[in-house]
Structure formats: C-alpha cells, structure tokens
Amino acid sequence: MASGTNTALEQRISLITLGVADPARSRRFYEALGWTAAFENAEIVFFQLNGLVLGLFRRESFDHDMKRDNDGQGRVALAYNVRDRAEVGPLLERAVAAGGSLLKAAEEAPWGGYSGYFADPDGHAWEIAHNGAWAIDAAGNISMEG
C-alpha cells in the first residue's frame, strides 16, 4: 500500500465460505433447500446469492488456504430472513428433511420476531427468522429500515 493512502474496508461482505467434510454432500443439501450451485469442483462449491457468494470448501483445503488449523473456537450463525412469519416453521422442516438437524424449533424471539435454528450436515448453524421491523426487497436484500 502506498504511503499516505487512506484505504478502508467498505461495509459489505462479498463471500461467505464454510469448511465442509464433503463438498458434494453439502451441495446436495443446499440444493435440496432449493438453491442452485453456480460452480463446483472436488474442493469447492459456489452458490451465487443476492449480492454475495456462499462457498462450501473442503475443510482440509480451506485450512491449508488460510495457513492455519481451525480449532473450532469461532461461534457463527448465518441467517435467512423471511418476509412472513408463517415461512419459518416450514423452512426449518425442509432443512431437517434435507439432512440437517433442528437446533431450536421456531418460537417467539425476545427481540420481537419469530425464529428457529437448524444445522447443516457439517454443523453450521443457520437461523430462519422473521423480523417485522426489517424490509426485504424483491431481490431478497434486507434493510434494517423497514
């Protein structure tokens, strides 16, 4: 970086990458939820989402790429917000039917919404949530200014 350059990260996320045991199995799971893979090889699968990409990267290759061993200490949950509270339960059921596991059944949330959690086959937590205070546009982009 040139001296004196004021470079900052823009407030956005481009790619979320999950370490998985078997990329092909993970692809089948996410496709059973209704998503379509945009790219796949033996090490990684990419799904083009609304404005960002989800990558499913073979764990060992992912660790090698980062130059570190993943000790599993991070706590992360991904979230899928829905337009209507009635969507939460059926989407949790679909995830379980596709091979995921239910972490928390849909229930009223202390923040005023309605949500539940499932884990994908590699244990990555996903929240399915309805927050009436947030807006979701036709492309699926969420805004905290509902």
Image: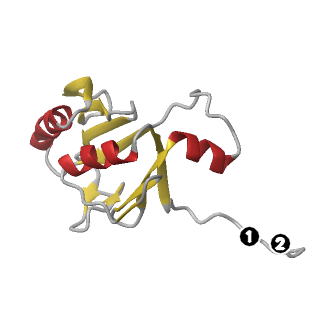
> Where, quadrant-wise, is the C terminus in this rendering?
bottom left
Mark 1 falls on what kind of element? loop
Element carrying mark 2:
loop
Residue 59, position as x, y percentages in the image? 52, 40
Residue 116 location (% of width, % of height): 25, 30
Q: Looking at the image, which is closer to me, 10 or 37?
A: 37
Instruction: Look at the image and name its color scheme.
Output: secondary structure
- Residue 28: x percent and y percent? 25, 47
Left or right of residue 68: residue 50: left
For the residues bearing labels 2 and 1, Cβ distance under 8 angstroms:
yes
Q: Residue furthest right?
A: 3
Q: Which residue is mark 2?
A: 1
Q: CA distance from mark 2 to mark 1?
A: 9 Å
Q: Is residue 25 left or right of residue 97?
A: right
Q: Nearer the viewer, residue 6 or 61?
A: 61
Residue at the (65%, 45%) spot, across then down: 64
Question: What residue type is disc 2 on?
Answer: Met
Between tags 2 and 1, which lies in front? Answer: 2
Q: Residue furthest front?
A: 42
Place of residue 106 in the rendered image (x, y in percent of width and height, measured from the top left): 19, 28
| Mark before the other along the chain sequence, 2 or 1 | 2
Q: Residue at x 18, y 52 (%)?
A: 83
Residue at the spot of label 1:
7
Q: Residue at (34%, 47%) from the top-left corner?
A: 24
